[in-house]
Amino acid sequence: MWEWTKALLIAVVLAVVIRSFLFEPVVVNGQSMMPTLHNQDRLILNKISKPKRFDIIVFHATKTDNYVKRVIGLPGDRIEYKNDTLYINGKAYKEPYLAPYKKMYKEQYGNNTLLTENFKLKDVIGRDTVPKGTVFVLGDNRRNSRDSRMIGVVPMDKIIGKANVLFWPLSDFKFIK
């Protein structure tokens, strides 16, 4: 009996340590990260790596809600959207993960329709650059996302982790880049 109890205790302690400090499963709730992630997708978060530009992260948005969003701006970055193009520190960046929605919007509403409305960081958060110790995040479904344009920048200490693996539904299994 003692051998079984000892094995069970070791397993529980390992599970708690791994989940608390290394990896954690989460469920996507909502449509804000479509087409990349869908409602009820299951992810594995890496809790030890620092977020980089374009990583998908999960963070504490409120006391009861966690949000899944993409890191767009790092501390010190100047962010601007102009004519559906992202500019970071004056340099244009491609966002291939938005291609399906951009195509859909242009087909449905014409070439002048923007997926991401024009904005400058100063208009959104009242500052020219992303403050130290924070990140600027956006959902991939730009027209249906509550992100830094509404809630402001995300403090680094509110970030739970970076999404590394989509493991459910099994048919959509992939490592997230």
Image (cartoon, helix red, strand yellow):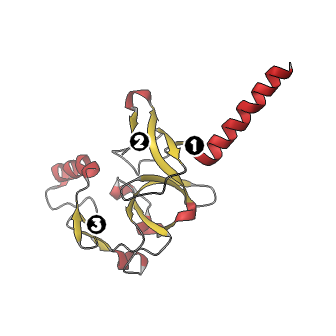
Q: Tell me which label, 3 or 1, sits earlier in the chain.
A: 1
Kindly report the distance in space between the C-alpha atoms of the residues bearing marks 1 and 2: 18 Å
Residue at image point 57% right, 61% down: 158
Q: Amino acid at mark 1?
A: Glu
Res. 12 image quadrant = top right
- Looking at the image, residue 26 lies above or below residue 172: below
Q: Position of residue 51 (x, y in %)?
A: 45, 57
Q: Name the disc covering residue 117, or none.
A: 3
Q: Amino acid at mark 3?
A: Glu
Name the image quarter holding the N terminus: top right
Q: Are marks 3 and 1 in contact (CB under 8 Å)?
A: no
**Residue 15 horizontal side relative to residue 159, left or right:** right
Residue at image point 48% right, 69% down: 134
| Label 1 element class | strand
In this rendering, the label closer to the viewer, 1 or 2 = 1
**Residue 144 horizontal side relative to residue 103, left or right:** right
Q: Name the disc covering residue 24, or none.
A: 1
Q: Amino acid at mark 2?
A: His
Q: Tell me which label, 1 or 2, sits earlier in the chain.
A: 1
